[in-house]
Image: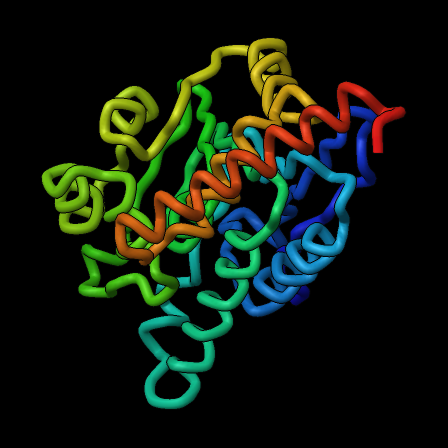
Amino acid sequence: MAGGRFELSPREPSGTRRVRFVPADRKGVLDAEALASLAAAAEALAGDGETTLAVLEGARPDLFAAGADLETVEALSGAPALDFADRGREALAAWESVPATTVAVVRGGCHGGALDLVLSTDLVLAFPAAAFAHPGAKRGIVTGWAGTVRAARRLAPRALLELFASGDPVPADRALANGIVDAVVSTDEELEELLRSFAGPAGDTVRRLKRTARAVEGLPLRAALSVEEALAALGSAEASRRSSPGRP
């Protein structure tokens, strides 16, 4: 049976492209084929300088995506297990490296490796029916796709423990309070209005912040401040050129 796949849409006039996960069956797992299609979409976006916003979403209203098939993961050991983990880490790292602002839109269940993927986006928007879980914890399976590392950047220690130790679903409102989610939206109209604020010139500030955060990560404070100052000056110059097209 063919696996699920991520489909990249054409660019919209706003500069937005959508990456939609189309599952192969009701389980909606992220298998090797799905991971390969995610990496391909990320590569295409990395070479697309005109896209300013990349929206990640599920094709089904009740499911964003699941992670790896837990029964398959339990059966893996040795080199095959490491290979599958590497594929997941590489695909998520490619998505995290997309230069455009990335936004995950979660309407329903988001489980396991899919949650790792969501945590690798810049912003997470959820509908009230969304729920986030790492069910592998109940089987003694720890995520191999760097989800714990990414979650630690967003969540307080208690929320991190709740998410990974219990394996129980976290509803949208609690996910918002914990830091998994950046905003909860109730309608498609509200969602699209919010997405428009991140696309095109309106989203320049967010993209500059993303570029700066990447550039200073891991640097000592003094060096980070120097890089931040230089990038701020560059951003101001770019904004000035856009507002005065005739100037050199």
Estimate the x, y position of residue 43 in percent, counting from the top left: 68, 60
Task: Decide which of 208, 40 is in the foreground and name it.
Answer: 208
Numbered circles on residues, count = 0
What residue is rendered at 69% in x and 61% in y?
Answer: 40
Most extreme residue toward the bottom is 79
Is residue 58 in view?
A: no
What residue is rendered at 47% in x and 26% in y?
Answer: 125
Task: Decide which of 214, 134 is in the foreground and name it.
Answer: 214
Most extreme residue toward the right is 246
On-image quarter of the N terminus:
bottom right
The answer to whether residue 134 is above or below residue 100 is: below
Is residue 156 shown left or right of residue 174? left
What residue is rendered at 12% in x and 43% in y?
Answer: 157
Estimate the x, y position of residue 168 in percent, counting from the top left: 22, 41
Is residue 227 in view?
A: yes
Estimate the x, y position of residue 110 in percent, counting from the top left: 42, 41
